[in-house]
Amino acid sequence: MDGLDEQDDVRTSVLRLVSVLSVLGVGGIARTEDDHLDAMDELGGPDAYRAWLASALLGAAQAEAMTADRLPLSRDSRYAVWQRQLEAADAGTDNPARRAELIQWQVRRAAAQLPAIAQENRADPIPLATAQAAEALQVLLAVGAATRGAVESGDVRRLATQATRLREARKALQAAVANTDVLLELLGSVDL
């Protein structure tokens, strides 16, 4: 019975995602049951298809949010808009652990392409510095989640267990600074 419930959950989720994507006018989305099955096979199964649809929805929502973020809003209004995003993701002020998890996920997802960009632009130290800084930020966010409350409670042991990760973050940050310095030195040698 669990297998049927799981299939129903996937089917419901897929249909919901397809419906929203259709309303947003996102193209390339399967419309018929056979098309959905073909897409699932092509992508590697129902979970991969569901993830693909969710990512397509996220991309469409991000495009809308980027446009909206360009609007002239007061600081308070912008903060309220961003709070609404957190609340919609069940990561409002009443759920700090979920908020930290969401931020970690956003950074990880945003930074995923940075190493590839750095690889494509080997002569430019800034993409590499960006990837290194993003790596350090991800580690620091993980340390923050692992040690949440440790400072207030004086839990030195929990803090100490993260020393290796903190050194890892510092090393990545130092590498980012070194690569930034490379470009600053190059610019310093150019007579503008």
Image (spheres, rainbow, N blue to C red):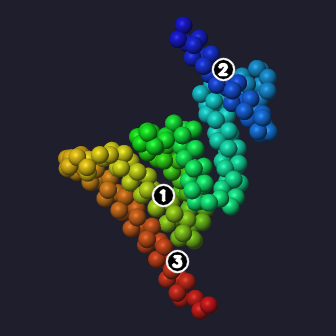
Which mark is first along the chain, 2 or 3? Answer: 2
Disc 1 designates what residue? 134
In the picture, residue 70 is in which quadrant?
A: bottom right
Amino acid at dot 1: Ala
Q: Quarter holding the N terminus?
A: top right
Q: Secondary structure at mark 2?
A: helix
Q: CA distance from mark 3 to mark 2?
A: 51 Å
Q: How many other residues sit within 10 Å of disc 1, few (<14), some (14-19) or many (≥20)? A: many
Q: How many other residues sit within 10 Å of disc 2, few (<14), some (14-19) or many (≥20)? A: some
Residue 181: where, in percent of width, then height? 46, 77
Which mark is first along the chain, 1 or 3? Answer: 1
Amino acid at dot 3: Leu
Amino acid at dot 2: Arg
Q: Secondary structure at mark 1?
A: helix
Q: Nearer the viewer, residue 60 or 2?
A: 60
Residue pictured at 38% horizontal, 48% vertical? 142
- Asked whether residue 70 is in view, the answer is no
Which-is-in-front pick, marks 3 and 1?
A: 1
Q: Quarter holding the C terminus?
A: bottom right
Disc 3 designates what residue? 183
Task: Determine whether, in the image, residue 63 is placed left or right of residue 152.
Answer: right
Q: CA distance from mark 3 to mark 1?
A: 18 Å
Q: How many other residues sit within 10 Å of disc 3, few (<14), some (14-19) or many (≥20)? A: some
- Asked whether residue 80 is in view, the answer is yes
Marks 3 & 2, CB-CB < 8 Å contact: no
Which mark is first along the chain, 2 or 1? Answer: 2
Disc 2 designates what residue? 11
Residue pictured at 25% horizontal, 49% vertical? 152
Marks 3 & 1, CB-CB < 8 Å contact: no
Residue 54: where, in percent of width, then height? 64, 35
In the picture, residue 29 is in which quadrant?
A: top right
Residue pictured at 41% horizontal, 42% vertical? 96
